[in-house]
Amino acid sequence: MPELPEVEVVRRGLAARAVGRTITGLEVLDARSLRRQSGGEDRLRAVLLGARISAVVRRGKFLWLRLADGPTADGAVSDGGGSDGAETGEALMAHLGMSGQLRLTTGETPDPAREASEGPASDPLRHRRVSLWLDDGSRIDLVDQRLFGGLWASPLVPAPDGLPAGEGSPDALLPEAAAHVARDLLDPAIDLPEVARRMRTRRAPVKALLLDQALVSGIGNIYADEGLWAARVRDDTPGAALSQRTAHALLRETAAVMRRALAVGGTSFDALYVNVDGRSGYFARSLAAYGKEGEPCPRCGTPIRRRAFAGRSSHFCPRCQRAPRPPRSRPTEGPSR
């Protein structure tokens, strides 16, 4: 599924072209994409129609559109700058799930004669589930082949720490549906030493801790494997076995990997992830461990191994990422004489 770099690429694309636009229409082609919406399509329609997109915000893998009053003082539809800007107190949540995409088009009707995409890629004609029409004639489409993603409205609540809620946020308000999500590694407000200390209180494998969105958000299978490889830590090392220095270094290395991925548009394998224009990212060419089973480790040349991990696959170098040492057992005293 799209991870932090991929979702951030989508956020930037939407922010550049959708902020200031007023939502003039909602088209629901598959109600399953609204299953998280209390009140269904009618409730979502009431929230969205006439609202202006004031910001596009991301925390971890979660994305939301901040909504403000859209009509101008005379009741006409805003052109993106004529409303009073009053916030509605709600945001449109977007979660991409396993295969979701947000595509921004000119609003032209797709050609029905177009052939479906080959392979596993989501087809923007057959897999379009929900569309938002904007006042400039453009359209934001939720394209989702596997239907694990979705859209829904959520009221805004204050972030517990009072700091900006996420990338692109103008203040400390975030959707109630995202209140449980921890800050991510690219968030300037994250306290990395504190996250490292919390990791070290847990006996769970360190990879499971990296994937725990309530501890640190935005990391999925790809960037967990890459961060662990960069920090020379094996996936099954218990959090409690890490030193503070190693735990902190692991978080820094994982953040660095995601920044490099973001710089080239994220990681795309099968076109299930593309940006708002339908273009793929290129970080797959720079992966060191993930998906590289049998290939030489870029650092030492040892073949990369793959094994099952919690229903996923883990990729690691058996030489660079050594198995964790078992805790030393205290010698038992013999019987007293």
Image (spheres, rainbow, N blue to C red):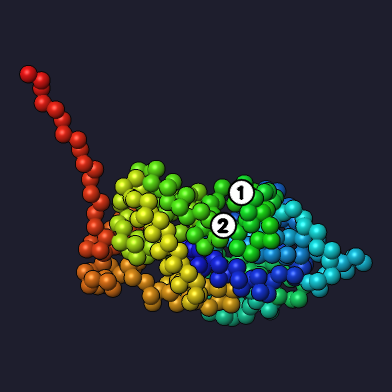
Q: Earlier in the sequence, mark 2 or mark 1?
A: 1
Disc 2 marks a residue whose amino acid type is: Ala
Instruction: Residue at 90%, 65% (x, y): give it.
Output: 73
Instruction: Answer yes or no: is residue 290 visible.
Output: yes
Residue 305 occupies quadrant: bottom left
On the image, the x and y values in percent for residue 336 come to: 10, 20
* Apparent side of residue 102 relative to residue 254 in the rendered image (left or right): right
Above or below, comparing residue 123 to residue 188 in the picture: below
Q: Quadrant of the C terminus?
A: top left
Which residue is the site of mark 1?
Answer: 161
Instruction: Residue at 45%, 64% (x, y): give it.
Output: 255
Say the numbered circle drawn on residue 226.
Answer: none
Instruction: Residue at 36%, 55% (x, y): give it.
Output: 245
Residue in the foreground of this view, choosing between 181 and 101: 181
Instruction: Answer yes or no: is residue 148 visible.
Output: no
Asked whether disc 2 touches disc 1, contact meaning CB atoms under 8 Å apart, the reply is yes
Instruction: Residue at 43%, 62% (x, y): give it.
Output: 252
Disc 1 marks a residue whose amino acid type is: Asp
> Which residue appears farthest toward the top when viewing the image?
337
On the image, the x and y values in percent for residue 316 come to: 29, 62
Residue 278 occupies quadrant: bottom right
Which residue is the site of mark 2?
Answer: 189
Callout 2: helix, strand or loop? loop
